[in-house]
Amino acid sequence: MELDIIISLVTLTFMEIVLGIDNIIFISITADKLPKHQQGSARTLGIALALLVRIALLFSIAWIVGLTEPVATINLPDWMRETPYALSWRDIILFAGGLFLLAKSTTEIHGKIEGHHEQAKAGKAASLRSVIFQIVMLDIVFSFDSILTAVGLVKEIWVMVVAVIVSMVIMLAAAGKIAAFINKHPTVKILALSFLLLIGFMLVIEGLHFHVPKGYIYFAIFFSLFVELINMRVRKNQPKPIEEGA
């Protein structure tokens, strides 16, 4: 195997893992709606179907690239945009996916703060089918940018497929531990939902042709998580208050 192919494979695999972080967060939070005995199956099945979806999309690159072609032109006011806005199917998919993430994250945060989320879990749980459907649909949205980026980095389809498979296997191995960690720490769960809000907003403005370098987004995510881990360590080391009369 040539050295440049090995470097491309490692680079693309790492990129897929990084871009898959938001997917794992969404899967972990969505699967938490299910009864305990179904959560592991939902994560495994969701990631497996996401893998099949991404491989299918990789073999439909010509169709994916075609979705970036304008299907309509919208003339906006000069103060918003000097040139006409060229609307493509990719823009529509990213915009709709971003709105869904914004709505989903806002609802989850509201339910967590108000206590409605725990009441819903104690009452009627979500169905496995609906959770899997949400996971696969949102993975299609997440797949667009990663696949278009992969096309710019690598020309060989098999390298893209191997990178996606390796990244998905790593995600599958880590999903359970990440989900347990998120669900164990309420503040981390709120932080994870905030990440999804940020990513949803990014998808919306990407759909409006306002490009935001993803490095900024992922730096903010990792920095916030690093600060939260320090806070957790500080809280753990603090002495417990002595009760009066003890």
Image (tube, rainbow, N blue to C red):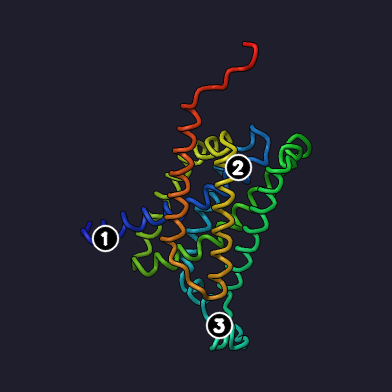
List the residue tagged with mark 2.
42
Compare marks 2 and 1 and give the one earlier in the sequence: 1
Where's residue 65, x and y in %?
A: 48, 74
Question: Residue at (57%, 88%) from the top-left corner?
Answer: 84
Where the C terminus falls, by quadrant?
top right
For this orientation, the residue located farthest to the top is 246
In this rendering, the answer to whether 73 lies above or below 229 is below
Q: Label 2, label 1: how many angstroms apart (C-alpha)?
A: 34 Å
Q: In the rendering, which numbered label is found on residue 38?
A: none
Q: Label 3, label 1: how many angstroms apart (C-alpha)?
A: 33 Å
Q: Nearer the viewer, mark 3 or mark 1?
A: 3
The answer to which of 97 and 161 lies nearer the viewer is: 97
In this rendering, the answer to whether 82 lies above or below 188 is below
Compare marks 3 and 2 and give the one earlier in the sequence: 2
* Amino acid type for the residue under numbered disc 3: Pro
List the residue tagged with mark 3.
70
* Amino acid type for the residue under numbered disc 2: Ala
Question: Residue at (62%, 87%) from the top-left corner?
Answer: 77
| Neighbours of disc 2 within 10 Å: few (<14), some (14-19), many (20+) | many
Q: Label 3, label 2: how many angstroms apart (C-alpha)?
A: 36 Å
For this orientation, the residue located farthest to the left is 3
List the residue tagged with mark 1.
5
For this orientation, the residue located farthest to the right is 123
Where's residue 125, x and y in %?
A: 74, 40
Where the N terminus falls, by quadrant?
bottom left
| Neighbours of disc 1 within 10 Å: few (<14), some (14-19), many (20+) | some
Asked if the residue under mark 1 is in contact with the one under mark 2, i.e. CB atoms within 8 Å, the reply is: no
